[in-house]
Amino acid sequence: MAPRAADVFRMMLQTTVFAAARSRAHGPTAALWHAVELHRPTAELDGACELTVCGSLARVTPEQAWPLPAADVCPVCAVLAP
């Protein structure tokens, strides 16, 4: 079934917001800052882990804006989330 014109128009008006999220250190892997694509307000985040742009899990830190000027930023997220 083809999408209706109103459905396509609504999807084109969506804005994407990226939030900063901190992963946990795991074995030899250091904790990094990642980007999380949000489709809801940050006030609705409940502290659970979110799927990052690069595919890992990290906890969103709403008070941190993306992109971060830190040195420990995930290189994949830095490329995929402008």
Image: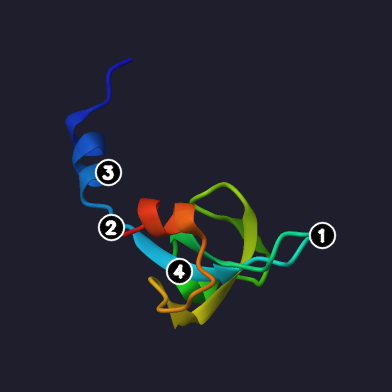
Label 2: which residue?
15
Label 1: which residue?
27
On residue 19, which mark appears? 4
Query: At x 36% / y 63%, what residue is drawn?
Result: 17
Q: Earlier in the sequence, mark 4 or mark 1?
A: 4
Q: Are marks 4 and 1 in contact (CB under 8 Å)?
A: no
Q: Coloring scheme of the render?
A: rainbow
Q: Are marks 2 and 4 in contact (CB under 8 Å)?
A: no
Q: From the viewer's side, name the closer residue of 37 and 46.
A: 37
Q: Which amino acid, mark 2?
A: Thr
Q: CA distance from mark 2 to mark 1?
A: 36 Å
Work out whether residue 38 can be spotted: no
Circle 1 SS class = loop
Q: CA distance from mark 3 to mark 1?
A: 40 Å
Q: Which amino acid, mark 1?
A: Gly
Circle 4 SS class = strand
On residue 11, which mark appears? 3
Q: CA distance from mark 3 to mark 2?
A: 9 Å
Question: Is 4 above or below relative to 66?
Answer: above
Work out whether residue 43 can be spotted: yes
Q: CA distance from mark 2 to mark 4?
A: 13 Å
Question: Is 73 above or below relative to 61?
Answer: above
Depth check, mark 4 against mark 1: the one in front is 1
Depth check, mark 2 against mark 1: the one in front is 1
13 on left or right of 31: left
Query: At x 50% / y 67%, what residue is drawn?
Result: 73
Q: CA distance from mark 3 to mark 4?
A: 20 Å
